[in-house]
Image (tube, helix red, strand yellow):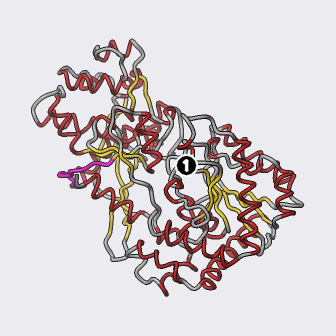
Amino acid sequence: MKEETARASVSIENRHVELRCWRYSAKGVRGFEVPIYFLDADLPSNAEADRNLTGTLYGGDSYYRLCQEVVLGIGGVRILRALGYNDLTRYHMNEGHAALLALQLLNDEAAKAGRQSIRSEDIEKVRSKCVFTTHTPVPAGHDRFPMEYLTRVFPGQTEFLDLKDASSADLMKRVLQVEQDFPGLQEAARRGASLNMTQLALNLSTYVNGVAKQHGETSRQMFPEIPIEAITNGVHAGTWTSSAFQQLFDRYIPSWREDNYSLRGALGLPAEEVWAAHLIAKYDLLETVRKKTGLKLDSEAFTIGFARRATGYKRADLILADLDRLREIAKNAGHFQIIYAGKAHPNDGGGKDIIRRIFQAKKALRKTVPVVFLDDYNLELGGKITSGVDLWLNTPQFPLEASGTSGMKAALNGVPSLSILDGWWVEGHIEGVTGWCIGESRRTVAGNAPADNKAEAESLYAKLEGVILPMYYNDRAKFLEVMQHAIAINGSFFNTQRMVQQYITDAYLR
């Protein structure tokens, strides 16, 4: 990365916080470069507390988080202008963390008109420039900050939020979630109002979307007053395809890097070469396991992978619900092994408990079902696991998986998924063709009934014992067909190339 000379600043508790940025250039297959700027407050001129604001992504308490969002939202707009981006027509906010940029733009519009107060025409101008993507399907995941925090961060500077005309006051009523007519900031604060960052972004954007079709439906239920579309996430094909499969695609589908959709041609790949590429990735993963743990796993054994953030709703331990059942499956249907990786947030006690249960199961199953947990989870290790296992397992609690992307990475490498029908898998799943589902579609279940862990675990076991393991060991040709369909159908579509094209046509050029 290269440090830029441009500087900007924000005010936090009346302290001048200077910001610089670092430029990273992402180069495309045709040589085009996209600049990515990383904000940095770690400058000698700043107070020690402020220097740490850009040091940790999810650190500190909610007040620390608000200060970070000042740097991102307000500081982000200002550093872009310092870099010469003065005529931007679209600002894309991902989650409410960046929503303060909308307040910065409102202030700018008022200043252009020689006013300190914000009016309805300012709101419309800002709204026409902003796009918002929500990634969180649960209310608790959306940042809300008490008015007390705002007055601490912006002492004597919150008057711009005290909107007076009818349209702007209605905006603040929604953003602060005040039941009656907007009473003014002081009264709203007295009533315990808080600034809802997601509502701020929702109400100041011309286009709003969720990150999968199912997530769009969930978001519309959460925010029924806002029209919310859906653009399903994708992964970068060139990054997440293993070197062995890259070489295979280069030989038979030479245009795949520039046109990910051409991966539809994977159905015509020689099956034996698909298997050979898969084995290279599998051997690489098992060698990594040996180096990290000293354990030599069987390369001929069916290998299940689960690697992602360790938190309660992802239910990494669902497959471990009945250890005796796992032993029976291994005895009756064929030997299998499970490779885990992932990290829990330091404050996520539930996530830590799940990792603890995995280690307990590992000890209990060691003679029949080898279980490995790889530490130091990072992008490189994640790529080895998504490409090197035989089956990708995904067991989120419906409807809490906004999208999920690890199964998309696996699909690029011919690894099919066994997953709950949530997030992207609602769209990517074709039973027995691209992979398999666990349980029934929750769209057929009345309301949002709580997940039945026991029933879903049994569905997982039945699919593994009755369908997947027999196919892998007794009908390898059929299993290879599923692998090729995973590439051709899911790898060709659930990628960032398609995703960005959708953002351009649906959100940016509207």
Q: Where on the picture, by quarter, is residue 291?
A: bottom right
> Amino acid under label 1?
Asp
Question: How far across and down, in percent of the image, does residue 445 sit?
Answer: 57, 39
Question: How far across and down, in percent of the image, does residue 223 sit?
Answer: 39, 33
Question: How far across and down, in percent of the image, does residue 105 sit?
Answer: 23, 39
Residue 117 appears in view: yes
**Above/below status of 260 relative to 12:** below
Question: Is residue 205 found left or right of 246 in the rendered image?
Answer: left
Q: Which residue is mark 1?
A: 422
**Chain part drawn in magenta:** 83-92
Secondary structure beneath label 1: loop
Measuring 54% from the left and 40% from the top, which residue is drawn there?
A: 59
> Is residue 85 inside the magenta stretch?
yes
Question: Is residue 472 found left or right of 445 in the rendered image?
Answer: right
**Above/below status of 476 relative to 311:** below
Residue 299 appears in view: no
For disc 1, the neighbor class at 10 Å (few under 14, some 14 to 19, many from 20) is many
Question: Is residue 292 found left or right of 71 in the rendered image?
Answer: right
Query: From this viewpoint, which residue is outermost toward the left?
Result: 113
Question: How far across and down, in percent of the image, does residue 504 sit?
Answer: 29, 58
Q: Where on the picture, by quarter, is residue 119?
A: top left
Question: Is residue 342 found left or right of 403 in the rendered image?
Answer: right
**Above/below status of 359 relative to 108:** below
Quick one: quadrant of the N terminus?
Answer: bottom left
| Magenta stretch prevailing secondary structure | loop
Measuring 62% from the left and 55% from the top, which residue is drawn there?
A: 437
Q: Where on the picture, by quarter, is residue 16?
A: top left
Q: Nearer the viewer, residue 178 or 78?
A: 178
Q: Nearer the viewer, residue 485 or 119?
A: 485
